[in-house]
Image (tube, grey):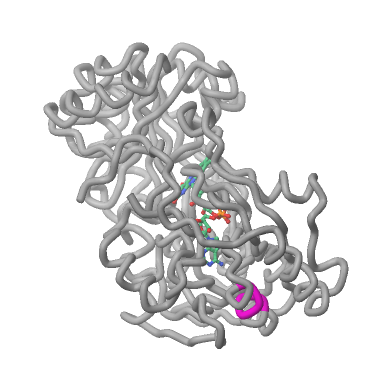
Amino acid sequence: MTSPVIAVGTDDGRPDFGPGDVDALADDLLALLGPRGISTLPRALERAGRDGSGMSPILSAQDLGTPDLVCYPRTAEVVPAIVRAAVARGVPITTRGKGTGNYGQVIPRFGGLVLDMTSLNGIHEITDQTITAQAGARMINLEQTAWGSGSQLWMYPSTVQSTLGGFLGGGSAGTGTIVHGRNHEGFVTALDVVYGTEDAELVHLEGADAQPFVHTYGVAGVIVNASVRVEPLQEWRCLYASFGSTREAFDAAHRLSSVEPRPRLLSADGPTIIEALPADPAFVRGRANVRGIIDARALEESTDLIARAGGRVEAVREGIAETIKLSTLSYNHPTWWLQKSQPDRWFHMEVRGDALVTRLEEVEKVYEGGMLHLEVGHGMMFGMLNGIYRNPQQVIDGVAALEELGVGVHSPHQWYVDLDAERVQALAARTDPKGLLNPGRWM
Ligand SMILES: Cc1cc2nc3c(=O)[nH]c(=O)nc-3n(C[C@H](O)[C@H](O)[C@H](O)COP(=O)(O)OP(=O)(O)OC[C@H]3O[C@@H](n4cnc5c(N)ncnc54)[C@H](O)[C@@H]3O)c2cc1C
């Protein structure tokens, strides 16, 4: 089954619960967590019901849901007790990290309990293979800890402040993906998960047993602890280059992607998007840009390649602050900055395939004002195609045209589980038999 381009809400999967069940759960949680561990205050509920879906004008125009109460566990041990209480009352549970997911997948569609994991942010252990932490640990803190031990994460998203549980629950790729693929492709080595059952406990899963819980929006279990892969730290350089045209920049990014050792990140944009990014001397007005986290051993070959491709090196920087900064300008972030600089104007589609480079002009023409942000992915080109927003139909109409050009499309305007949905639904039927974990995520 292919994912729809835009979400159409129905009440399918709405758990049968009412205000009395919510009140009873509030009493249970008060007894478990104390008065500071739970809130029904409008400000807290508003915060707990917000995420990055503002990037989609289509999702923004819809009522995606409002929580009835939010709780803040401070120990791993209390999480199963919270889940048991909610399941006993029949109240849905939506697990929340930093709330940067941009498909509305952390907004509780039918209300109920939001389980805010951000206080569970401890880092347990780092070895030369893995780092183990609580689900609320920030990705930036994991990367910093890894560097302190001479290691680096296999990958982290451009939303570096987002949580480990949220990246595993709702994210997919980022800095490191060029080499290691997406986060469900071996990044996780072990998880402690709580299922949505009346006798819920922490369940420890390793290897192949842990993988199926990744990128499932928390519908199959609450991740409490996770071990993810690290590798020996490389000597990184942040390379910024400018080009006279977007075409030259994208061609260069394509070629840079195969220089060995391979880059950790490679992003490219035309002059209009570059102007929307935070000012930096390495971003030259009127010129396209390629920026990458490049292994120091590949620097000479990469700078030669840039010169041969008609570009100019604008800066070479080093240190973790610089690599993190460059990461925060990748993936969805250029679109985010574009939308910030010109509010209520732009939408985007996630697109992939070599046609993004080989047929760039045709791809950009599909949508009015079309501008592509390019990322190098794992063995393929990937990007965000930005267009001027008119209406939902115009967004849908562009998909066929893109596919005709050989472009793969993933829509960020829908909230359904989009990775092997049938497999995830079968898993959730076992681990969440009452359908209380983040319900309403099936087409
Ligand atoms: C500007 C911008 C840039 C982005 N860049 C990237 C990027 O580079 N790469 C990328 O992959 N994504 C990206 N995203 C999407 C999102 O930021 C990431 O996926 C992020 O890692 C989500 O983490 P979070 O802590 O904010 O999770 P949340 O948004 O809180 O949650 C995301 C999903 O995971 C579930 N979840 C959260 N915690 C748990 C848990 N402990 N157990 C089970 N399920 C859980 C939630 O229910 C929800 O469905 C971007 C979004 C924006 C707005």
Reply above or below: 230 against 280: below
Residue 327 image offset from top left, x and y in percent = 51, 45
Residue 285 image offset from top left, x and y in percent = 51, 14
- Would residue 198 be found to the left or right of residue 180 on screen? right
Residue for point 45% across, 64% down: 219
Residue 415 image offset from top left, x and y in percent = 43, 46
Reply above or below: 374 against 271: below
Q: Is residue 83 magenta?
A: yes
Tell me which segment is drawn in magenta: 82-86
**Type of secondary structure dominating the magenta stretch:** helix
Kindly indicate the quadrant of the structure image that contains residue 7: top left
Viewer-side residue, 23 vs 114: 23
Tell me, yes or no, if residue 425 can be seen here: yes
Tell me, yes or no, if residue 235 can be seen here: no
Q: Is residue 255 magenta?
A: no
Residue for point 76% across, 73% down: 29
Residue for point 48% across, 59% down: 439
- Would residue 362 be found to the left or right of residue 195 on screen? left
Viewer-side residue, 57 vs 184: 57
Residue for point 40% across, 60% down: 215
Kindly indicate the quadrant of the structure image that contains residue 185: bottom left
Residue 148 image offset from top left, x and y in percent = 62, 69
